Amino acid sequence: MLALAFFLQTAGGFSATTLMLPLLVIVMMFVMIVPNQRRQKKWAQMLSEIKPGDKVTTNGGIRGTIISVKDDAVQLRIPPDNIKLEFAKNAIATVTTSEEEK
């Protein structure tokens, strides 16, 4: 009988770990999820603002100058032979606009 009372008391009570779990989830959200969302928004904004003449680097490391911009693709001129290649917009890693170079 005493063992049953002890079991019911411990099963119904909250431990410190149970009370800390929601706080831990919130902290993990701010540490991991929020910075990634900010980075994603900044990257999406960068892609929406690209224009011909911008110098870009692709995820594969290819550097070139944008010739034309379509809905989901960009055409790049790759030096030194001025080869024209078409890439998906989401393959662009970084953009260096002409204002940043000055």
Image (spheres, rainbow, N blue to C red):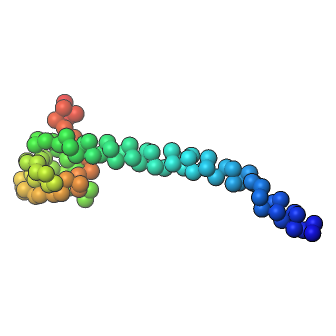
For the point 7% across and 57% down, which residue is it?
Answer: 83
Look at 38% across and 43% down and name the residue there: 38
Q: Quadrant of the C terminus?
A: top left
Residue 21 is left or right of residue 63, and the answer is right
Which quadrant is home to the N terminus? bottom right
| Between 82 and 68, the one nearer to me in the picture | 68
Tell me: 83 left or right of 25: left
Q: Is residue 19 above or below residue 11?
A: above
Work out whether 45 lies above or below 78.
above
Q: Viewed as shown, does residue 50 lie left or right of 27?
A: left
Q: For this rendering, which residue is in front, 79 or 96?
A: 96
Give the number of callouts. 0
User: Which residue is found at the position 20% from the left and 47% from the top?
Assistant: 56
Q: Nearer the viewer, residue 12 or 66?
A: 12
The x and y percentages for residue 74 are 13, 52
- Rendering coords of residue 33 (x, y %): 46, 49
Residue 13 sits in quarter: bottom right
Please say whether residue 79 is visible from this viewpoint. no
Q: Quadrant of residue 4?
A: bottom right
In percent of width and height, residue 12 lies at 77, 58
Tell me what residue is drawn at x 90 percent, y 68 percent.
3
Residue 29 x/y as whole percent: 51, 48
Q: Is residue 14 visible in this depiction of the protein?
A: yes
